[in-house]
Structures are given as structure tokens and as C-alpha cells.
Image (cartoon, helix red, strand yellow):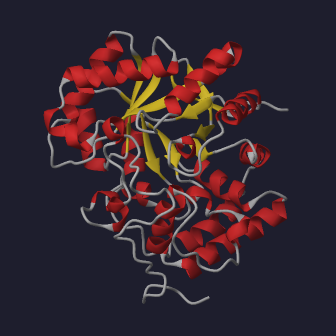
Amino acid sequence: MSAVETVELASGFRVSRIAKGNWQLAERHGPPVERERAIEDMRAFVEAGITLFDCADHYVGVEELIGEFRRRYPEHAKRLRVSTKLVPDLDQLASLRRADVERIVDRSLARLGVERLDLVQFHWWDWRIPGYVEAMHWMKEMQAAGKIALIGTTNFDSPRLAEVVASGVPVATNQLQYSVLDRRPERAMVSFCLKHGIRLLCYGVLAGGFIGRRWLGAPEPQPPFANRSLVKYRLIIEDFGGWARFQKMLAVLDAIARRRGVSLSSVAARYILDKPGVAVAIVGARSAAHLAETLEIDRLRLTDAERAEIAALADTAPGPAGDCYELERIEGGPHNAIMWKNQNTAGAPREAPYADAPPAYRPRASNAREEKP
């Protein structure tokens, strides 16, 4: 098997351009995870050349699972880089102290079984609560102490990322949502990150699995959904313009895919990997069942004409609107309502089954914005 394409996020810090996303392994994201199967699947990904795993402190149980994989397969662990996140709970933001941030870092070190975290990506739930810049300076101190290799951000908007950079924090990466359905990074974030040498790690490139041939020509789904990813990305499809417009995009991707003998998912992910400033596409993987298809992304090279076909439709979409993660921060909005914001202290909520749409969810596919086929 040929080597998977890699990229340097910083000097000497090289990773595969495709990362294994692990949100789907989190507790109550979907059906319970078969632990032994998950660990063996991780081995398959590393052996295939996918050497960046993405996780988070608040993906309940995932850091521990990766740590167990590292202990069981120490030779594989030597090839692996892990990007985790530091996500203080919403209820703790107002009283957050340096000791709290260091405790989260130390907990991730212990869970993953490492002496230094490869990449820590910082998230802040509510901009109305001050403290995010100070917290990132505490991370900078921990970087100087050898506990963190690279500092990143996740779900920051352009003004707040600019504020952090201006304060002197060495931000190496910014993880954000970016796909053929969600072009919010192109409004301001991409140009800012290119100017400041910040590499983009992109999640949502396959819209939680919606960008796949199984949904081409399928009837519009209604809740309850099979997992929380589908709840989240069904909202993005609505903002993109509804189910009929989404079907048009799938048809464009599928036409390219059939000409090239690959999956339409591979076309969609490669399109984002080819975007300016993008270093890594994070592909969510509950198992290794689609590993061969994931590796197609690495081998595929789109032509300018094929990228133009996709852009022609994407450019006409009415949304999602605003800056990166702006819709998700609107209090009372449907995107905000699905977030579990206190998982570090409370875990995944037991009262909210993973398959249920939130109370605020109201399908909008039949409204005036919906295009007819």
C-alpha cells in the first residue's frame, strides 16, 4: 500500500492529512461501543497510514480508549499523534482558574498514557463570559513546561481567534466545521489563518455520514435519528437550503464519483482537503468498516473542472450563515439546543437518549426556502 499523504503542522510535527475522528465512540453518541473491536479498528487505521487520531476531553470515554490502544500496541503508538481538546464545562467558565486548566491537561495525559500531549485544541462555550484569552495563556505556560507540544483552538470565530493571536499565544491549528454544505470558514477565517500560519483541521466534511451514496435519492429523514451526528448535520442540511438542494449536491458529487470510480464521500472530502489553508480532514469513524473507502480520499485528485462543478452549486446556497460556529452559539436556537455542555463533570446526560432530536428541533425542509427538485 502506498504511503498516505502527510503534512507538517509545525516543524517536526508530521501527521496524515486524513485523521480518524472519534466522536462516534463517545458514550451515548450512539449504540454502545464494542471496546475490543474499537481497539482493533484503531490498529487497522494506524497500519493503513492514518496516524492522527482526533478526540476530546469531553468525548466521554474516548481518551481512555485511545490510551488503552496505545498500551496494547506500543509500536503502533510510536507512529500515532493524538489531537485532543480542552473544553471546560459551561458551568465552570465563570470561576475557571489556572489549576482547573492544568487539572484537565493532567487528566488527558493520564488517560492517553503520555508525558506530553501532541496537540490541545481549546474551546470556550460562551463569549459573554470573560477568560478565554487568559486560559490560553495558562496553556502556553504548560507548553513551556513540556506538558503540551502544540496549542490549537476549536470552534473559535474570526474576531476571537484574532484576539488570542494578538495576545501572543502561539496558535498552530484551528479545528472547524467545513464541508460542501458549510462554507462559513471562507468568509473570514481562511484568510486570517493563512496570514498567520495557522493550519485548519476540518470536521463535518461528510456531514456525519449524510454525504454518502445511501442518501442519494432517499426520502427526507425525520426524527428520531440513529445518532447525535445525524441530529447535528440534519440542521446543517436545512441551513444549506433543504433536502432537495442537498439532493442536487449529492447528484453532482455522485456524477464525479462515478466517472472516477470512487465514492461520492471521497469526492466531498477531497474537495475540502484541496481548499486553501486546509491541512487535515477529520473523517468520523466508529469502525474500520469504511477504511478502504476512506483511503480513496488520499489517492483521489480532483481536476479544476470537477472542483468548479461542486463550487457552482455550493456558491448558490443560502447558508449556513455567519462566521464559524456562530449559529451553534445562538441561545435557544436549534444548533445550540443539541449541545451537551457539561460532560466533563456530568458525563453524557442519561435523561436524553442519543437518538432523540432536541425539543427545539423543528424540521424546516418544507418551508419556503426549500427548493423543488
Q: Quadrant of the C terminus?
A: bottom right
- Which x, y percent locates residue 44? 75, 32
- Which is more toward the observer, 248 or 303? 248
Asked if residue 76 is positioned above or below residue 297 in the image, the reply reads above
Residue 266 is drawn in which quadrant? bottom right
- Which x, y percent locates residue 344? 35, 36
Side of 124 where 354 appears, left or right:
right
**Which residue is at a point 69% across and 58% down the rendered structure image?**
265
Q: Quadrant of the N terminus?
A: top right
Asked if residue 349 is positioned above or below residue 335 in the image, the reply reads above
- Which is more toward the observer, 180 or 189? 180
Give the residue furthest to the front. Answer: 351
**Which residue is at a point 17% across and 35% down the rendered structure image?**
131
- Which x, y percent locates residue 282? 57, 43
Query: Can residue 182 be seen here?
Result: no
Side of 332 where 307 appears, left or right:
right
Query: Can residue 315 be seen here?
Result: yes
**Which residue is at a point 54% across and 76% down the rendered structure image?**
222
